[in-house]
Amino acid sequence: GNDSVNGKRSILGMFSNPGELFGEVFLFLNHDEYANYACASSPSKILEIPKEYLTRLGDKPSALQNKMLSNLLTIFAERTYYLNNRLQVLSCSTLKQKIARFILQNMNDRDRVTLKMSREEFADFLNAARPSLSRELMKMQEDGFIKVVRKDLIVKNLEGLKSL
């Protein structure tokens, strides 16, 4: 994440599965410092891979180096896709539109999104205040767009969400 000059936290990503990467973009940038940080919410182990292992390949890269580079390209593509979706959410003009876009991007085949973050983290993700997010979710429920059940957002009016 990172913090703005006024102290507002912005969550750039959430990682909950073993083997997930973070900081891979910075691996190929030549900066001494970065404005982002990582914070573990549960006990974690981190494996650091030296940049030289992936950039100084010699005449014949090992199978492991080739596989790691291939995986990195896939990760870069997935991260680009994620950031594009995030940009679409954040570029919405109202909080209701941000929530609707997030739901449409993340719902499963049962028209449901199970949040993997707290309400506070979800608000930070949408660049909104938590009380405003809670009010808007309740209003969207009252208006028949969604049903909120703990961490589940259940779509009740798909066409209505799409029209927001």
Image (cartoon, rainbow, N blue to C red):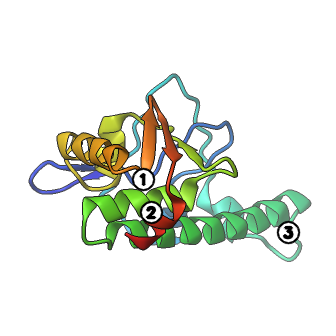
Question: Going 23% across and 52% down the picture, which residue do you hit?
Answer: 128
In the image: residue 146, left or right of residue 20: left
Between disc 3 and disc 2, the foreground one is 2
Residue assigned mark 1: 145
Front residue of this view, candidates 141 and 40: 141
Q: CA distance from mark 2 to mark 1?
A: 6 Å
Q: Is residue 148 visible to the viewer in this orientation of the structure?
A: yes
- Give the total number of marks visible in the rendering: 3
Q: For the residue marked with disc 1, what is the amino acid? A: Phe
Work out whether mark 2 precedes mark 1 in sequence or the reverse, and give the earlier one. Answer: 1
Label 2: element kind = helix
Q: Is residue 1 visible to the viewer in this orientation of the structure?
A: no
Work out whether mark 3 precedes mark 2 in sequence or the reverse, and give the earlier one. Answer: 3
Residue assigned mark 3: 61
Residue assigned mark 2: 161
Compared to 108, does 27 lie above or below?
A: below
Front residue of this view, candidates 96 and 157: 157
Front residue of this view, candidates 113 and 29: 113
Q: For the residue marked with disc 3, what is the amino acid? A: Pro
Label 1: element kind = loop
Between disc 3 and disc 1, the foreground one is 1
Question: Going 40% across and 49% down the picture, which residue do you hit?
Answer: 144
> CB of mark 2 within 8 Å of CB of mark 1?
yes
